[in-house]
Amino acid sequence: MENGAKQLLVCNCENTMPLRGDALAKACGNPNAARMHSQLCRAQIEEVQKAAADGAPITIACTQEAPLFEEILEEAGYEGDAQFVNIRETAGWSEQAGKANAKIAALLAESTIAISPAPSVSMQSEGACLVYGRDEIAIEAARQLAGRLDVTVLLSNPGDILPPQVMDVPIFKGTVSAAKGHFGAFEIVVDDYAPSVVSARATMAFEAPRDGASSKCDLILDLTGGTPLFNAHEKRDGYFRPDPGDPAAVQRALFELSELNGEFEKPLYVKYDADICAHSRSRKQGCNRCLDVCPTGAITSAGDIVEFDPFVCAGCGSCSAVCPTGAAGYAIPATTDIMERLRVLLGTYHGAEGQEPVLLIHDEQHGTPLISLLARFGAGLPANVIPFMVNEVTQVGFDIMSAAYAYGVSQVILLASPKQQGELDGLASQIGMAEAVMEGLGYGGGRTDLLIETDPEALARHLSGLTTRTQADPASFLLMSGKRTNTRMAVEHLHAKAPAPIDVLPLPAGAAFGAVDIRTEDCTLCLACVSSCPTGALMDNPDKPQLSFQESACVQCGLCVATCPESVMALDPRMNFTPEARNTRTVKEEEPFECVSCGKPFGSKGSIEKIVETLGNKHSMFKNPEAIERIKMCEDCRVVSQFQAKDNPFIAADRPIPKTTDDYLREREIEDARAKVKADREREN
């Protein structure tokens, strides 16, 4: 299978990997792989120089010496695209390295996929740093930073502290009662605030305290050892909270802080599309999935939509994983890039006759070092376990898992760090969805695992204990559309190849696919649900009272349930594989009610009868038959009837017809004619 690289340089790292060039070339579909190098970074470095002269794209199967290779390419004037792939720790350093040709070919092919650059936001720090502590440790830390930053010390409930001989940093007393903001723009509120007394002798003293003092700063060094000022504090840029009892940790924090003065770029982790957000409508709450899983509080409700603070967002990606519509889309990398990587990776693996692939999804900070330790000191990864690196494991949603299974994966293992324990709820819900679909279609459950591990030996035991699983015939289609479309394509492929396909598959509560059960006998066709539905799954008919529903568009946000005045709606999470799911079906329809005065059709019969039943002879405004009849009138006739009613408090006598100039002239003509007739009679007499 062609992997897209015109130039491919493979090194067996001084014969520490049992690679066969001919077998690898066949698996890759690239004859360049047949030429095996053993010391590409040293004795055979001229091979890299020769490749640079060609100018074509280069793939080098080594990441350890990537800086050296980049330097050689730069010196050679190379301006093409160079990719570096780790096949050593991921495949070659393994007890099963001899069987890993298909995996190596897949990893080489995946490396050729171009990744869209992520956008970024700019953050500015002027170097204003608050050192928040309790004792001399905070004062000493502030002194170390004073040469690089503008430092202020705030001591919370300080004990007996010897006053410094030279007040080279300003020192105050106080306890932070509230904090918000981010790197470059922190805001704090301090209670028990007081400046130090300059004449203090044996111990530091402070002036009379006051509450509610506020201040701003760019950086915070928290050495109190108490409760963090922020949720998920380790993810809040610019906020450092080392253990004050660990001098090494404090010094590391000081080293990092000293460099945080100036302008910095931060990735814009999430792209948000408010047009397809299902959060709220008309002050009725719908989907809160992203708000529920965000560990840093970077997402807040803003009416019908939500707002993302890119400066607070730490990039865990949980919001993107659980978002039912794709309104919150992760950008590092974009999901479309991940889908294409999966397609090429697994397509190459199957094309090279690889068997029972297990996808090991991991991040760079935790997963990559653990895999490296397993390769260096253990058995290495099994030949069928394919590592797949993402920015954050928590960004993986049901759409990515279902795509992996559709492309022929046997099992999916997500490797997470214990540090992520508090932010795995969203990922767990997505795993539950994947398990429900795979088990419900007959593939069997227990094939999607979340592994929280730091021990490479424990990882090895888990991987060696994997059993053979039924897998779908691999798909080859492109997944480049929206999130829901991609997911449905993948799941429908799994359904088509399933050992035990069923038409309607129940899903766990909270799933983003399903129907709406409507108790039609009590529905009055008020159509409030139609106006609240953010995806158009519920529809009306402009020509007659009618409610229709398209199941494939429903995201189970619950807005219709919250809006329905009769409380006749309920969510039914499920995956419907029948054509009915894509078609629009009529839920209920009635003949329009005709105005009792003019016969104009308006409203629905059920709605009008319901209003008459509820208000007639019961409400103070509808105690007489005339008032009840007005309910049965259209908007025009109702107004006319109201003003013609005898009990209308605004009724008055008929207004006189105003006289115009023509009326006065006409009266004058009549009077002149009468005077002439009278004069003529008098002359005759």
Image (spheres, helix red, strand yellow):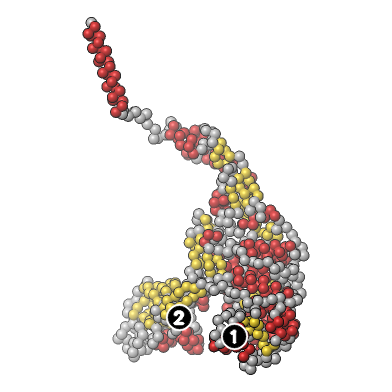
Label drawn at residue 283: none
Q: Where is residue 167 in the image (x, y as percent from the top left)?
A: 34, 87
Q: In this view, does 277 lie to the left or right of 457?
A: left
Q: In this view, does 330 lie to the left or right of 260?
A: right
- Residue located 68% across and 59% down the image: 575
Secondary element under disc 1, as helix, strand or loop, is helix
- Residue located 67% across and 63% down the image: 489
111 over 72 or under it: above or below: above
Q: Which is nearer the eye, 264 or 197?
A: 264
Q: In which quarter of the image is residue 155?
A: bottom left
Q: Is residue 228 left or right of residue 398?
A: left
Q: Mark 2 points at which residue?
A: 222
413 over 486 or under it: above or below: below
Q: Mark 1 points at which residue?
A: 53
Q: Which is nearer the eye, 568 or 391?
A: 391
Q: In this view, does 468 lie to the left or right of 675?
A: right
- Residue located 39% across and 83% down the image: 149
The type of residue carrying mark 2 is Asp
Quadrant of the image containing the N terminus: bottom right
How far apart, in angstroms, are the residues tagged by discs 2 and 1?
54 Å
Question: Could you tell me how many numbered marks the image carries?
Answer: 2
Q: Position of residue 52 (x, y in %)?
A: 59, 85
